[in-house]
Image (cartoon, rainbow, N blue to C red):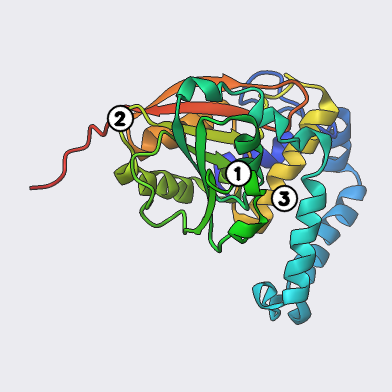
Amino acid sequence: MTERMTARILRHAMTMRVFHEPEPGMVAHTSASKVLSHSPANDWLQSGTREMWPAATKVSAFTDHVFAKDNERAGQWARGMAIFSERPQFNLSYITDYYDWESLGDARVIDIGSQGAVSIALAKKFNNLQLTAQDIQKGRDDDDVPEELRDRVRFTAHDPFAPQPCVAADAYSLRWMFHNWSDKYCIQILQALIPALKSGAKVLVQETLMPEPGTVALWKEKNIRATDLNMAAAFNGQERTVAELRSLFTRADSGFTFQNVIKPEGSAFAILEFTWQGSTKKNPD
């Protein structure tokens, strides 16, 4: 297990007062973790973690079943995520109200990895925006858009790992996408954008920010770290700090410049703004 993953797991345990971090990068026992290290309860704990839990993942009824080919379960997942996203902290007003969309002027915005809800919300509020919502499969029919918005909102199918077909747009928005992917694939998504970017184009990322240990209420840190480990188990993804998100852009290309981070009170997401200044990488002759 990597040092980075070890730290993620330990910091989740710390939200339940198992271990603590007296200074950055140092792990020490709490009374709870010390008892577990020497108590007979440790044998019971390890029988679960070393025997029962791994065995549970080998049940063929689960491992032989291809989730993506089960329309009923896939639909259930989609409906569940829709309900999950209706919670107040996911309200679209946090993206429409807290970023200065009017500063873009008459702008073309590409909403990447989206079923279109963000695009429609933005179009309702800002007459200066032309919006394209992209997803692996076309998110919805154009007829589903309110009639008064149809000349400014469109839907297209696009794989975010393929070269971006919408060239020279003013802004590209990626909402809640990076936490599904490891660093390697996040960087590939960004690099697929680069050929389409004009100088000055904005790239806006909306993600849950991983707090530094001890900087937020324990219950809040516990929830975020639990989600982080869920993403690791399900997708090899993760929740990231501001520094980790900035690092993705730096590693993708030094032509990305970090501008700002906006943290709306009550929102599940922060908005990170980057500007494309032009690649410093030279094409081979």
Residue 56 sits in quarter: bottom right
Kind of residue at badge 1: Leu
**Residue in the foreground of this view, choosing between 91 and 263:** 91
133 with respect to 199 (left or right): right
Residue picked out by circle 1:
149
Number of other residues with Cα within 10 Å of mark 1, as a class: few under 14, some 14 to 19, many 20 or more: some
Q: Are marks 1 and 2 in contact (CB under 8 Å)?
A: no
Tell me the distance, in whole angstroms, between the alpha carbons under discs 1 and 3.
37 Å
Q: Residue at x 50, y 26 (%)?
A: 273
| Looking at the image, residue 227 lies above or below residue 280 | below
Tell me the distance, in whole angstroms, between the alpha carbons under discs 1 and 2.
28 Å
| Looking at the image, residue 54 lies above or below residue 102 | below
Residue 137 percent location from the top left of the image: 56, 64
Number of other residues with Cα within 10 Å of mark 3, as a class: few under 14, some 14 to 19, many 20 or more: some
Q: Residue furthest front?
A: 148
Query: Which of labels 1 and 3 is toward the front?
Result: 1
170 with respect to 209 (left or right): left
Query: Which of labels 2 and 3 is toward the front?
Result: 2
Residue picked out by circle 3:
230
Residue 84 percent location from the top left of the image: 80, 48
Tell me the distance, in whole angstroms, between the alpha carbons under discs 2 and 3.
37 Å
| Looking at the image, residue 84 lies above or below residue 19 | below
Query: Which of labels 1 and 2 is toward the front?
Result: 1
- Secondary structure type for disc 1: helix
Residue picked out by circle 2:
199
**Residue in the foreground of this view, choosing between 282 and 5:** 282
- Secondary structure type for disc 3: helix
Q: Which residue is drawn at 37% across and 49% down?
A: 192
Kind of residue at badge 2: Ser
Q: Looking at the image, how many numbered discs can be counted on the residues?
A: 3
- Secondary structure type for disc 2: loop
